[in-house]
Amino acid sequence: MSPVRVVVARGDPLERGRTVGYELADLIRGSLEFYWRYLVRRGVGAGELPGLLAPYLAAAERELPDLVELVTGMAEGSGVSFWELFCVNAFEELEPLLEAPSGRSLPRERCSTVTISGPGYTLLGHNEQWLAGDVGHVAVVVELPDDGPALVSPTLACCLPAVGMNEYRVAQGIQSLTAGDDGVGIPRVLVSRHALVASSPADALRRATLPGRAGGYGHSFAFGSGSAMSIETSATRFAVNGQPGSHTNHYTDSELADRAPPPSQGSLARLARLQALVDERSPATPAAIGEILADHGGGGPQTICEHGHDDPADEASAIVFSMICDLDLGRMWVAPGSPCVTAYEEVDLAGVV
């Protein structure tokens, strides 16, 4: 596996987007080749994307126009269609609108996060579980805005940063969730990018629960102050757990769970294994968190370090990158692939934290 690519983007949203798009143009185009295979299997042509996604774009432009500008700049810098790039950033909204070739709707089995806090350490570990067709299209984006907090984020090349750490030493991990009130609104990825620059627990709550969102996520936050919290959201509701812990792809709050599909066995297995390993090992170092994120045990239908075997193979679940943040020290490590076979590399956070 090649060393992780790092892009430093400065300026206003359009300028930063153009820099990211230009520097990652090869990864963006390679990624879009996979998404077009995905769309063609479902009978979707290029001319249909505006009709499918225009309501989501309108919602994003109303509430988060700066992030739409970021996507616009990325499209311009990489020389690709805005609608194709926006499609990837609204992928979790688009998926339910499209029928899988098999005729079955697959659950969103995406991402596992753990937060740990103790005397002298606050850690966040995250496995980005996504579609295998996007393996290898990973980079670290450092944003140094003219106006607003700096951030550093490992991300898929076509996507806005959603997980990472900002200059306030606030880190975020994200887990996909599905609820009965999912609908038209601001795409989840844009909401997660909005929350990635939170300055405090109160600001994290305000940003993660932005009104008008299309659906919800599990937002796991860790803070340089030594605390951690999780916020489960749906399109219209939310629940807060003010303690460190683990999260996968189902609601743990009982009221939200009652309004969502039953948890999948894969999500339940990963959460149980995370909780068991934390209880058993009491991890207190980044290396200990990395060992948990690389785990294949538990005997469930999915593991923390998942290597799916679906057909077609490029739509199987895979860990596309893994991230560890040490909030007390202001350090981050990224493995640009499955952490069981990919070494973590420390990211230079100079100028960010």
Image: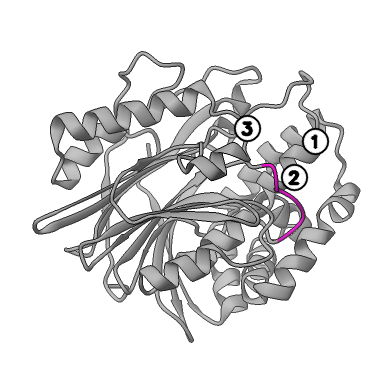
What's the residue at 54%, 32% (across, down)? Answer: 109
- Tag 1: residue type? Leu
Q: In x, y percent, where is residue 13?
A: 58, 77
Residue occupying the point 69% across, 40% down:
35
Image quadrant of residue 294?
A: top left
Quarter of the image for residue 281 reads: top left
The disc placed on residue 98 is: 1
Q: Is residue 183 above or below residue 249?
A: below
Q: Residue under label 3, please give it.
A: 261
Question: Which secondary structure lies at badge 3?
Answer: loop
The amino acid type found where label 2 is placed reads: Leu
Q: Report which residue position mark 2 lands on.
A: 94
Q: Position of residue 319 (x, y in %)?
A: 44, 34
Q: Name the residue: 58% across, 64% down.
A: 22
Residue 352 locus on image (x, y percent): 32, 73
Magenta span? 180-185
Quick one: label 2, few (<14), some, or many (20+) residues within 10 Å? some
